[in-house]
Image (spheres, rainbow, N blue to C red):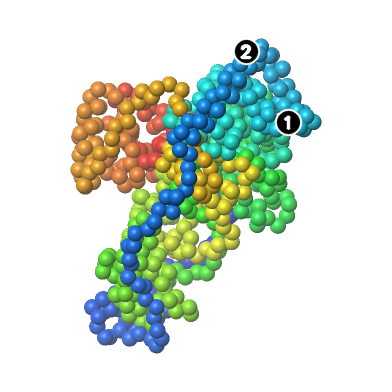
Amino acid sequence: RNGLGEEWSCGRLRRGEVARKSRGVVSMGLFDTIKSAIEGRDDVQKGAGVGLKASKVRNAPKENPFAKVKVLSRSENEARVEKYGERVQRINDLEDEIEKLSDEELQNKTNEFRERMVSGGESEDDILEEAFAVVREAAFRTLGQRHYDVQIMGGMALHDGCVAEMATGEGKTLVSTLPVYLSALRGESATLVVTANDYLARRDAGQMGKVHRFLGLSVGLVQSRDEPPARRRAYACDITYVTNSELGFDYLRDHLALTSEDVVLTTRRLGLCVVDEADSILIDEARTPLIISGKGQDASAKYGIAMQIAAQLAPRKHYIVLEKEQNVVLTNEGTDICERALKVSSLYDASNPWAPYIANALKAKEVFKRDVAYVVQSGEVQIVDEFTGRVMPGRRWGNGLHQAVEAKEKLEISSETMTIASISFQSFFRLFGKLAGMTGTAATDAAELKKVYELDTVQIPTALPVARKDLPDAVFKTQQGKRRAVMREVALEHTKGRPMLIGTTSVEASEALSELLSEVEVPHQVLNARADVAQRESLIIAQAGRKYAITLATNMAGRGT
């Protein structure tokens, strides 16, 4: 059982047993069989029956599903920001009064607000201005940070159940303290702050938690290695910091729980959920559903045979690679060759299906590349998170894909898994009473956020004019040309002593650039998902801003570092 509650049996076949235990390949060597099928010779006999073959792939133009979705226009956005500005002014007017309060008097404001909401019938919106003023003062006393006016506006957008687009460096983490405090006052439902990784959750719970604790609220933190009792205590707090994946899997595990003692999250209603880096979590990562699996059947032999067949097939002739969909489709010729090589009448025969094994073998060959989608560590395939660049221990691809990659790498093939529980992020986040998000890049995804989650995107102005220069993208025809341009830029800037961060999209690309820098004896650091490198992550990041420093990094050095 791994950290996600997935189970699989440990029975495996040695590679030498693969050919002996396969169905339908008896008298002829597999490679000879494949070769004969590709050459179209008649010494390969197929069984009786009718085979189903894949039709030709047609790249028909698709209509943009979000083209007709109504999002906030520029004038509507400006009107909303102006409305927020009026409330900010009233909050500013309260500042002198709040500032005079002692620590004890400021802390007592929490009980006062609760009493007004319960006995006086006031709503969250009724006390918003005074509550935000209290949080602003508490943040200044505990952190030495005072919310700017635009940060107050961002807090209002989150309270309204919107996505607040705020530029990098505008302090979105501090913004979240405002609506989260207001929501947690009633204490009737869970108030959650969802982040992209454990580091961010731990950092925010530690820093922003000081504000909430000062004001008398309890703060919980859920980390990937926490046991159920610790998770239950964390979710029972007024405010809980957690990653999107841990939150989703806890929800699934609650629905598999056999007793009430095993439930950790759904002990009360799901209230406010504030999602940090909303575009990444709600859109990019939401393409992959959350799945808890258990052990299934052992079909190790088929994976080995399918990979040997896939290795002999040619792209565009025998199969079409659909990179965007991360899929591979056999052509009619490819289907025919596979059926002849396996001596079966159809790859889709329900009693002896081969289609999923061939499909997964081709995906492993063409789509899921080593040191990009995964790394091999300690004899195991470890998936690399495409959004964080980090290895995800215990995670496995489903539907036989993980076994196909193991066969490709000539590792021991683990048993298949079967889905026990599953939910999409889209369905899960819509369960909350109020959903809000914050990010630096939401405008381009505003239509999708509106259609899928009913979230308006509000663009919040910056506190000061932006001093950063955003240069246009440079596009190259070849990898070689792009890398030469990177080296030229390094040569120009390194001599000035300017610290540089060079971002790459994969382990493979980071190491290729590292070799080029090493050839010209330029000192640098590499940060990627390799185990020996990842262990030094904090040290590498801590030194990245020094004069003359060059850091080559995958997206591990993105959100939170």
Q: Earlier in the sequence, mark 1 or mark 2?
A: 2
Q: Quadrant of residue 500?
A: top left
Residue at 71 percent across and 46 percent down: it is 267
Image coordinates for residue 315, horizontal then vertical, percent: 27, 65
Quarter of the image with the C terminus is: top left
Q: Callout 2 environment at 10 Å: few (<14), some (14 to 19), or many (20+)?
A: few
Q: Quadrant of residue 45?
A: bottom left
Q: Do the residues labelled 1 and 2 touch (CB within 8 Å)?
A: no
The vertical placement of 374 against 559, above or below, is: below
The vertical placement of 553 against 448, above or below, is: above
Q: Identify the residue under disc 1.
A: 122
Going by the numbered disc 1, the residue's amino acid type is Glu
Image coordinates for residue 469, horizontal then vertical, percent: 32, 27
Q: Is residue 75 visible?
A: yes
Residue at 39 percent across and 32 percent down: it is 540
Which of these two is toward me, 118 or 237?
A: 118
Residue at 47 percent across and 70 percent down: it is 299
Residue at 47 percent across and 52 percent down: it is 287
Which of these two is toward me, 342 or 425?
A: 425
Q: Which mark is residue 96?
A: 2
Q: Quadrant of residue 153?
A: top right
The vertical placement of 83 against 532, above or below, is: above
Cα separation, mark 1 vs mark 2, equals 24 Å
Q: Is residue 29 visible?
A: no
Camera-near label (1 vs 2) is: 1
Image coordinates for residue 449, horizontal then vertical, percent: 49, 45
Going by the numbered disc 2, the residue's amino acid type is Asp
